[in-house]
Image (cartoon, rainbow, N blue to C red):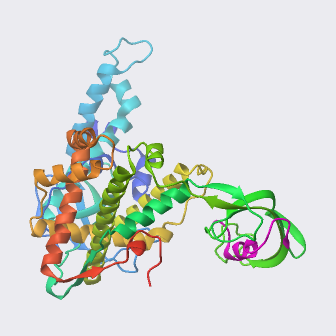
Amino acid sequence: MGSAVSRRCRLPPEFLGRIRAGIFRPYPFWSRPLFKVSKMTEKAEEVKNEETEVKATKSSEVTDSSLTAPVNPLARSVEVTVSQDAVSAGTESRLKGYAKKARVDGFRRGHVPMNIVRSLYGQEAYSEALNEEIGKAVEKAITEGGFRIAGTPEVVPAKDMPTDGKSDLKFEAHFEVIPEVETPDFANLELHRFVCDVTDKEVTDTLNVMLKQRATYKDVERASQKDDEVTVDFEGKIDGVAFDGGTAKDYAFIVGAGQMLPEFDAAATGLKAGETKEFKLTFPVDYGAKNLAGKIADFTLTVKKVQEPVLPALDDKFAESLGIKSVDQLKKEVETNLKREVKSRLTARTKEGVFNALIEQAKFALPVVMVRDEAARIGNEYRETLAARGLDVKNMPNLDPQVFAPQAERRVRLGLLVSKLIADNKIKAEPEQVKAFAAEMASAYEKPEEVTEWYLKDQNRYAELSAAVIENNLVDFVLGKGKTSDEAIDFDVLMGRKAEA
């Protein structure tokens, strides 16, 4: 290493101070996929070459996160030594590049003296060169060590980092490894393949729901009952004081439709127009308005109008109002749609049962970084869902990742397990399966052929379909290996219309 280069390009004192304090963290090398390793070792053998010395050790250091366990069995670290010669050579190469583009008053472009270029860009060039060499060294260490890393390594200066500006630099890379995932004992898995038939009753019930959705209402003089629409005035008070949202005029709702709290619904039932009723209502402890949750309110309710539903006739005219030629065709389409929806829900429920059974046997440590990142991803999904519903999330405080930890742990555990099973059992998606799946997805649309083509012609959409098919094939594989029995499920339970017993 030339002395002139070492004097001018070594880290300035304040930068060395940052290294000693552990503030400086090189970054570029892990912004791209570098670690193409297939096996993992508990402890890597020492690797030496002309520029890099590697020492791999098992570490019990805990990663900085609220989701971290007291001792992390997946934590590892490697120590690397970076040659000052290589860093200096990289610095000089970059400075030459800066010299060609530098614009300095009083000099033509490309003719700025090197000492000025070095004074302006020396620190930046050195940092870039150092980052590149650290990246090479850490990548080499991880590859040679046989580690399958999870997440992004954290690179920090070693405790014995030289500060003389001449000696080679030492760094430590801390990371977690992907755990070894053992294959579950399929033979001992108690599994269920859920089944449900679509009969004429389900078709008729669905048609009746459609008729109710298009009902008109007429005034009646009798007392209100279930399915009637009532128009009311009401006033609520807590400890004698009215509260926001507790008073309304000419408020209409359907009795027994679950639009109001049960006590309110019950109070409005059995009253004629012009009748008034006073009652107490206890707000649920998990009520959306926190200032009302768990409190008891005194309500006064006056019914102003009672209307009963008038259903349209189930005939060709009704079918035509839905864009369908005849009532017979409507019934066929309802049956087809119900069967498609039932099949989808049965598949999802069976898959969930299989995955739950697999997770019960999947006892392995999880990389903290993967759980943390997944929790953050779930939090972002939650915010996006709220935003899609029209809520203002810009000023919403960030949620504690710990809230999403159980869900994140499940996702990570399941993801690692499924990946292992797919690889070990060579589960794949045949092109014909992907095409059939695309056609099934498209069958709910008006022009299924066009939608099928839309799914298949895009590489990303095709990949998503293929992943779904592979997952379904894995479920079928596990069902074939375990103790599997068919289990009938009630139609209304499956469709979410009725709670499970």
Q: Please state, as top left, top right, bottom left or bottom right, where the N terminus lies in the image.
A: top left
Q: Residue 439, how many percent across, how many down?
A: 22, 49
Q: Quadrant of residue 181?
A: bottom left
Q: Is residue 157 above or below residue 320?
A: below
- Please say if 190 is above or below 40: below
User: Residue 369: image x %, image y %?
Assistant: 36, 65
Residue located at (36% from left, 80% from top): 71
Closer to the camera, 80 or 333? 333
In this rendered view, identify the residue nearer to me: 409 or 73.
409
Q: Position of residue 3 (x, y in %)?
A: 25, 39
Residue 20 is a magenta residue: no
Residue 98 showing in the rendered view: yes
Taking the image as shown, residue 197 lies to the left or right of residue 275, namely: left
Furthest residue in direction right, as rendered: 240
- In the image, 483 versus 29, the foreground residue is 483
Task: Report the magenta residues as a range.
Answer: 259-276
Q: Indicate the quadrant where residue 240 lies.
A: bottom right
Residue 368 visible within the image: no
